[in-house]
Image (cartoon, rainbow, N blue to C red):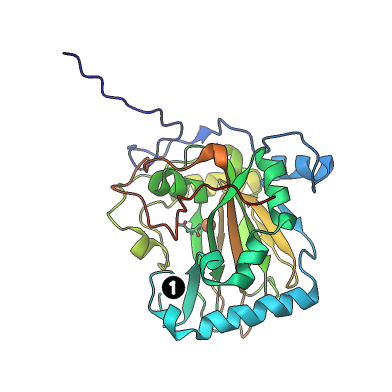
Amino acid sequence: MTTTTHRRTDLYPTRTVSEPRPQSRQDPTVWSTATGPLDRGRLAQYDSEGYLVLENLLSPQEVEHYLAELRRLNEDETLRGTERVVREPDSDEIRSIFEAQKISAVFAELIHSPRLTDIARQVLGSDVYVHQSRVNYKPAFGGAEFDWHSDFETWHSEDGMPRPRAFSISIGLTDNHPFNGPLMVMPGSHKTFIPSVGETPADYHKESLRVHRLTVGSVDHDSLTRMADQHGIQQVTGPAGSAVMFDCNILHGSNGNITPYPRSNIFIVYNSTENALEEPFAAPRPRPQYLGNRDFTPAPR
Ligand code: 6CS
Ligand code: FE
């Protein structure tokens, strides 16, 4: 009797490799030429740079509405002890709250609104669903940095996302100044996949979401230096209500916040329903639902 061990194809091997040898992205950034909320020029810019600023996505009234909800969640004692809430590494302040669409009807309405999902369907060329959402508070007087990384490297390794057919929209609920830890990206870096060296420990997310320095899933310094030299580093700033969409594989990070001004954003990750999660490509078991959604029901149109 012959046994065939079915070994699936891993297009982006990482954490199981002995050295961080960069590879070219094997997939498009923009998956369709369909018309939609973004015109051809903006689509071309997003394809080339890997990110795009969406000015005034929210009106000042909407910003107030969502900021009030942000404050309500911050005060919600029932939430504080749950695994969805990640604290700052150096204080008891909240760093992130995950799966906002499940714990807040107010944010669920925004996260599922066609104003966002129409962009996602246009760029990803299919129906979409929410892979992950989080509110990152980056509080005043000490909100910690987020080390350089590729989201896709984590979502591929730990959530089983096959291809980079997903992107995030980060919406500023407070002003993102140059000085209070705004997102930084390396424009164009999304077209290179840089593997990380080092096996994923069990339940790694219990550590990785709140540390100053990533141990596993980090980008080695030689690769970071080469990519920064090649692509540059762009700070993404803007008033509350503005947003930025960025590809799942673009190298990004953000500095800490020692100013009196919080940098609080809501991040929403849309994945193509044709890129549904499988078993992790480099982790002992899938991460919990609130980090890697496994209900692939398409977002309503
Ligand atoms: O592990 C994750 O899914 C999260 N970690 C980072 C640093 N960015 C993406 C996501 O929020
Ligand atoms: Fe990230």
Q: Quadrant of residue 106?
A: bottom right
Q: Quadrant of the N terminus?
A: top left
Using residue 135 as the reference point, say whether residue 109 is left or right of it: right
Q: Is residue 135 above or below residue 50?
A: below
Task: Give the residue at the far top of this rendering.
Answer: 1
Q: Is residue 297 above or below residue 110?
A: above
Report the residue at 67% width, 48% height from top. 120
Report the residue at 32% width, 39% height from top. 16
Residue 123 can be seen, yes or no: yes
Report the residue at 54% width, 44% height from top. 226
Report the residue at 46% width, 31% height from top. 11
Closer to the camera in the image, 222 or 278: 278
At mark 1, the secondary structure is strand
What is the three-letter code of the residue carrying label 1?
A: Val
Q: Which residue is mark 1?
A: 85
Residue 129 image position (x, y, % from top left): 58, 49
**How many numbered marks have been drawn onto this rendered protein structure?**
1
Q: Quadrant of residue 279?
A: top left
Using residue 249 as the reference point, say whether residue 6 is left or right of it: left
Closer to the camera in the image, 94 or 36: 36
Q: Quadrant of residue 60?
A: bottom right
Residue 150 can be seen, yes or no: no
Closer to the camera in the image, 89 or 27: 27
Residue 18 image position (x, y, % from top left): 32, 37
Q: Is residue 174 above or below residue 57?
A: below
Residue 84 image position (x, y, % from top left): 43, 69
